[in-house]
Image (tube, rainbow, N blue to C red):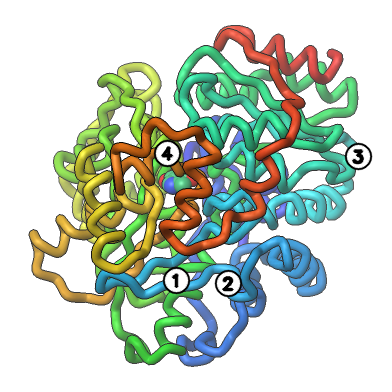
């Protein structure tokens, strides 16, 4: 299985090379030349552990990894770092199923992929005889940054630099990042928003002069952002796993279709569900949930993607995104895997901030339903579900639950539905607790966390306990325009 770029048909590289490069030199994203079909039966996966299933799914994509290499990566990733043996438990609540993807080190779903990416990357470097030190350069809207830092901290042969919007992440998210340990970790706040950070990082990846100077000093970039195929592939696993758990618990019959609802920002998580569906997972609808930054809702409704609008800071900051990078992989596919067509759309997005797909391409969106949740609706959903069943969900998951409610009311579809629960409520304790009782807003951050623990009847996760007293180790802030200068400073070039 080789990988090609969404922007040039002549690219064809191995999986390990695609993981190392992160993004194609032409600015495109790597995609498998075709989406592989599952070569296992649904019945067979019903009894598999997360690790076994991860191997079955990932081996279809990472074909140049040996069995030993891939199993080694999986074993080192999905171990006692997770606070439950199930890795991603499925919780039945409010007449639906919540796939809890937040049991890793940093209590958000990014851990699912970022626990394994460092192992995939260092294995890929070994396979390709890379001697340079690998510099992970990442822009984060909050959760990726910490999950990447935790994954790469003190991994030999790597260094990690994370840029985040100084005023665009939650206090817990920021504290988690700036207290990160590890001599190879660097965290920088920028004065802009997430899109500025992402654009700045993308520019550096495409900067030939910078690449040359780095190479002279024995460095090379790689990306831990969700555009890396090494992030996308591990995320496909848990959609199969949720299906396996539903089968195991006799909630569905083999072959029965399910809906999957995903709170969406950069479109990586839901794209993984789309890949799972195209591999053969029985899916009826992929429900794409946005917050008030509803570019995707508008896109699904009109076929026009338009980022020319105000950027809204919401209580679900990891979804505060106006350019959903991974959407490019879907555009490429519904354009008939046509790199030229896709490139024209992406050029229009860069130059005009918008593009409009053709009528025939719109037919390719039939698997999706898009909607969004306002801030008020999101808070009301948290309260409603808590009142109804004592289950406390975070703000991102609440966006998804709200949109799923809208979908159900609109369509009367009763297909069993899995909602991707992307963060622990402890990560967004203030928003969550104030949704349940606005009077709590006067409490201090950590008092709120204790209150949440009491309310949800869930112990405070280790990831939160850790930062209670941890010293700040990173306090660099830079102007958006100075990102390259900052990186050069860190690398001493
Ligand atoms: C990153 C993130 C999302 C959005 O996922 P995408 O793959 O970027 O669409 C949703 N919720 C949480 C908690 C996240 O960290």
Contact between marks 2 and 4 (CB within 8 A): the answer is: no
Percent position (x, y) of residue 234? 59, 61
- On the image, which quarter does residue 307 sit in? top left
Where 361 sits versus 132, above or below?
Answer: below
The residue positioned 46% from the left and 89% from the top of the image is 248
Q: Quadrant of the N terminus?
A: bottom right
Q: CA distance from mark 4 to mark 1?
A: 39 Å
Q: Which residue is mark 4?
A: 430
Q: Position of 266 compared to 478: left or right?
A: left
Q: Quarter-wise, where is residue 20 in the image?
A: top right
Question: CB of mark 1 within 8 Å of CB of mark 2?
Answer: yes
Above or below — where is 132 with respect to 250?
above
Q: Quadrant of the C terminus?
A: top right
The CA distance from mark 3 to mark 1 is 36 Å
Quarter residue 156 falls in: top right
Q: Which residue is mark 1?
A: 279
Look at discs 1 and 2 and give the one toward the viewer: 2
Q: Is residue 268 visible?
A: no
């Amino acid at each position: 299985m080789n990988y090609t770029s969404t922007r040039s048909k002549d690219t064809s590289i191995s999986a390990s090379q695609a993981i190392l490069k992160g993004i194609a030199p032409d600015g495109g994203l790597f995609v498998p030349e075709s989406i592989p079909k599952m070569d296992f039966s649904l019945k067979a996966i019903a009894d598999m552990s997360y690790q076994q299933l991860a191997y079955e799914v990932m081996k279809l994509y990472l074909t140049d990894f040996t069995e030993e290499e891939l199993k080694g990566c999986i074993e080192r990733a999905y171990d006692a770092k997770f606070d439950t043996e199930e890795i991603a438990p499925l919780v039945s609540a409010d007449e639906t199923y919540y796939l809890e993807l937040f049991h890793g080190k940093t209590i958000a779903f990014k851990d699912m992929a970022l626990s394994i990416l460092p192992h995939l990357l260092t294995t890929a470097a070994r396979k390709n005889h890379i001697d340079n030190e690998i510099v992970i350069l990442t822009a984060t809207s909050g959760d990726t940054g910490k999950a990447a830092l935790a994954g790469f901290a003190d991994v030999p042969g790597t260094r990690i630099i994370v840029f985040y919007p100084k005023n665009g992440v939650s206090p817990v998210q920021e504290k988690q990042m700036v207290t990160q340990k590890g001599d190879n970790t660097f965290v920088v706040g920028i004065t802009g928003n997430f899109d500025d950070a992402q654009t700045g990082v993308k520019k550096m990846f495409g900067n030939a002069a910078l690449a040359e100077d780095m190479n002279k000093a024995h460095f090379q970039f790689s990306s831990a952002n969700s555009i890396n195929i090494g992030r996308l592939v591990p995320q496909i696993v848990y959609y199969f796993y949720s299906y396996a758990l539903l089968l195991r618990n006799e909630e569905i019959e083999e072959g029965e279709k399910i809906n999957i609802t995903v709170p969406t920002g950069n479109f990586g998580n839901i794209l993984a569900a789309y890949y799972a569906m195209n591999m053969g997972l029985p899916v009826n609808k992929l429900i794409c949930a946005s917050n008030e930054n509803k570019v995707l809702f508008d896109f699904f409704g009109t076929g026009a993607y338009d980022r020319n609008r105000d950027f809204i800071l919401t209580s679900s900051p990891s979804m505060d995104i106006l350019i959903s990078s991974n959407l490019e992989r879907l555009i490429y596919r519904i354009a008939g895997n046509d790199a030229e067509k896709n490139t024209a759309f992406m050029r229009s997005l860069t130059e005009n901030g918008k593009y409009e797909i053709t009528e025939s391409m719109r037919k390719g969106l039939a698997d999706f339903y898009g909607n969004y949740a306002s801030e008020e609706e999101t808070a009301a959903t948290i309260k409603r579900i808590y009142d109804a069943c004592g289950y406390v969900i975070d703000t991102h998951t609440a966006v998804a639950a709200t949109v799923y409610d809208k979908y159900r009311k609109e369509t009367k579809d009763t297909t069993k539905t899995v909602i991707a629960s992307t963060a622990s409520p402890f990560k967004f304790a203030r928003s969550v607790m104030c949704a349940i009782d606005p009077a709590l807003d006067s409490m201090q951050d950590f008092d709120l966390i204790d209150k949440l623990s009491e309310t949800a009847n869930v112990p405070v996760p280790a990831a939160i306990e850790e930062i209670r007293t941890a010293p700040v180790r990173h306090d660099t802030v830079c102007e958006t325009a100075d990102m390259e200068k900052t990186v050069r400073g860190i690398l001493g070039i």
